[in-house]
Image (tube, helix red, strand yellow):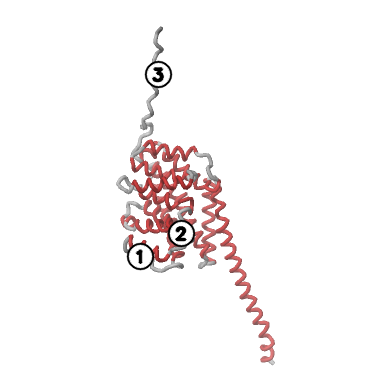
Amino acid sequence: MPTKLLTSLAPTLLAGALALGNVGCVKKMILNSTIASTRIGAGAADTIGDYELARSAASAGMMQFEGMHRLAPDNEDALFMLMRGWAGYGYAFAMDDFEAATLAEDDDAADYHKKRAKLALDRSIAYALELIAKEADGFEAASSKDADTMKAWLKKNFDEKEDAENLFWLGSAWLARVNLLRDEREYVAKLYVGVAVLERSRELYPEYMSWGATATLGAYHARTPMAELDEAKKLLDQALEKTQRKALGVQLNYARYACAKNDQALYEKMLNEVVTADDPDPNLRLQNTIAKRRARRGLTKAGMEDCGFHPGAVSKPAAPAPPAPAPKP
C-alpha cells in the first residue's frame, strides 16, 4: 500500500515541482523584462529640465537599480543602468555640490561632497569593469602596464559599435574621478587608462551621447596650460560643428580650453552662450540644464578668479570716433 501510494503520488509531486520551477522562471522572465524596459525608458529623463526634480529622481532610481541588480546579478541591462546611473549622479550632482562648496570656500562641505562624488564614481567604475569583463578578460593586466598596452587590449577585444556605450561610461567615470582626485598621485598615474578607453569609444561610435567622447577628450587635452591645447581646440571645434551647438556641455568644455589659454574673452563668450541658450534641443534638456548651472557659476566672481580672470577685465571695443564736423561754407 505505501508503495502504491507513493507511486500514485509521483506524478502529482513531479507536476508540483515543475510548476514551482515554472513560477521561478516566470518571475525571472518578468524581472528581466522589467529591467530591459527600464533601460529603454530611461532616456525620457534626458528631456527633463528641472534640476531638483532630476536630482530626486536620480537618487531614488539608483536605489531601485541596486535592488534589481541584487535580484538579477547577471543581468547586463541592470549593470549598464548602474554604471551609467552612478557616473551621471557623481558628475551631475555630487561633483556639482563639491564644486559649489569649493568656490564658496566651505572646506567641510567640500570634503563631504568630494567623498560622495568619489563613492559614486568608484561604484560606476566597479560596475563598468564587471560589465566589460563579460566581453573580455585582462583589463587589470593591461591597465597596469602602459598606454600602448591598454590601447592594444581595447582594440583587440572591442570592435563593435555597441561596445562604445560601455566604454564611454567607463572612460567618462574614470576621467571624472582623476579630475576629482587630481592631487592624489595613484589616481593621476592611471589617467591614461580612462583616456584610452574613451578614445576607443570615440573610434567605434563618435555620435554617442551627442559626440560626448569627443567633447570630453577635448576638455582632457585642455587640462593645463601646458597640455595639448591645439588638439583640444580641434576636438572641441569638431564637437561644436557636429552638435550644431545644441549640446551646451561642449561650450562649457570650450570655456575650460579658454581658461587654459588664458583667453578671458573666449571664456566669457562660451559661458554666456550657454547661459542665454533657449532650450536648443528638448532631448538634451537635462544635460543642458546642468551645463547652464555650471556656466552661471563660472561667470561669478569666484568662478572667474578660479580661472585667473577678473570680472570686467575684458577690454571693450573702442567707441567709434564722432563724425568730422561739416566744412563751413
Q: Amino acid at mark 2?
A: Ala
The residue singled out by tag 2 in the image is: 164
Badge 2 crowding class, 10 Å Cα cut-off, few under 14, some 14 to 19, many 20 or more, is: many
Observer-nearest residue: 178 or 222? 222
Badge 3 crowding class, 10 Å Cα cut-off, few under 14, some 14 to 19, many 20 or more, is: few
Q: Amino acid at mark 3?
A: Pro
- Residue 23 is situated, as x and y percent measured from the top left of the image, at 63, 72
SS label for mark 1: helix
Observer-nearest residue: 85 or 242? 242
Observer-nearest residue: 110 or 308? 308
Residue at the spot 44% in from the left edge and 47% down from the top edge: 239
- Residue extending farthest front: 329
The label nearer to you, 1 versus 2, is 2
Q: Quadrant of the C terminus?
A: top left
- Residue extending farthest left: 226
What is the spatial separation of the Cα atoms under label 2 and label 3, in whole angstroms? 59 Å
Q: Is tag 1's residue or tag 3's residue first in the polypeptide sequence?
A: 1
Q: Is residue 40 left or right of residue 92?
A: right
The residue singled out by tag 3 in the image is: 322
Residue at the spot 31% in from the left edge and 45% down from the top edge: 225
The label nearer to you, 1 versus 3, is 3
- Residue 12 is situated, as x and y percent measured from the top left of the image, at 68, 82
